[in-house]
Image: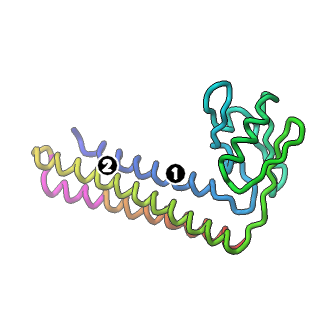
């Protein structure tokens, strides 16, 4: 087993953790309409659970409204119920075959709450990065104990993994700072 795969696998896991944190950040609404705020909502459709983006077209006609147009008109009521049950703080308004979601203004307290939520999401991302680091370091230790790599190589690879970890955690922190500024500057 060569080392490069362990380091690259660790790097890939860290990138997934960063991407997941960014996706989570995009679900926090900042007063600007975004399809990502609702596309993951689970809807009871045709006897099974489907994501909203799989049963409807989601658009943002303006910066304060999300518009949902189901591909099947019979899905309007299940989609409306799913949005209400998701408890995202937006009340759907049905207009024929369309569902409109007007975004409420964010007050100061709500913004502070959203900043706390963003901090939790960032911490979960950092934890995932640290888990990837731990897994990579353990794999290197096993290789060193089995004699497949020297102790010097292990220490060098450990430093590479730590550098990747520091870079990933900094990237999550930078995105968190950007999201925090976006939430507080509205």
Task: Tell me if residue 147 is in the magenta stretch.
Answer: no
Residue 179: quadrant of the picture:
bottom right
Residue 185: quadrant of the picture:
bottom right
Q: Nearer the viewer, residue 166 or 186?
A: 186
The residue that disc 1 covers is: 19
Of pointers 1 and 2, the one earlier in the residue sequence: 2
Quarter holding the N terminus? top left
Q: With respect to residue 78, does 182 lie above or below?
A: below
Q: Residues within 10 Å of mark 2 (few under 14, many from 20)?
A: many
Q: With respect to residue 30, does 185 lie above or below?
A: below
Q: How many marks?
A: 2
* x then y, percent, for residue 112: 63, 72
Q: Residues within 10 Å of mark 1 (few under 14, many from 20)?
A: some
User: The residue tagged with tag 1: helix, strand or loop?
Assistant: helix
Magenta residues, as a range? 149-160
Give the main secondary structure, helix, strand or loop, of the magenta stretch. helix
The residue that disc 2 covers is: 7
* x then y, percent, for residue 29: 68, 59
Q: Which mark is residue 132?
A: none
Q: Is residue 122 left or right of residue 4?
A: right
- Which color scheme did the rendering employ for the protein? rainbow
């Amino acid at each position: 087993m060569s080392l490069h795969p362990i380091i690259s696998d660790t790097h890939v896991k860290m990138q997934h953790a960063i991407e997941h944190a960014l996706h989570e950040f995009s679900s926090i609404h900042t007063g600007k309409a975004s399809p990502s705020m609702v596309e993951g909502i689970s809807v009871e459709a045709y006897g099974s659970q489907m994501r909203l983006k799989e049963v409807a077209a989601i658009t943002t006609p303006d910066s304060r409204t999300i518009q949902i147009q189901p591909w099947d008109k019979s899905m309007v009521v299940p989609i409306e119920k799913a949005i209400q049950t998701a408890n995202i703080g937006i009340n759907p308004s049905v207009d024929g075959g369309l569902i409109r979601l007007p975004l409420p203004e964010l007050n100061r307290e709500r913004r502070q709450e959203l900043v706390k939520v963003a901090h939790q999401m960032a911490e979960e991302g950092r934890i995932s990065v640290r888990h990837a680091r731990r897994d990579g370091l353990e794999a290197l230790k096993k290789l060193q104990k089995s004699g497949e790599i020297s102790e010097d190589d292990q220490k060098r690879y450990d430093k590479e993994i730590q550098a990747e970890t520091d870079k990933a955690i900094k990237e999550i922190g930078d995105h968190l700072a950007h999201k925090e500024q976006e939430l507080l500057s509205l």
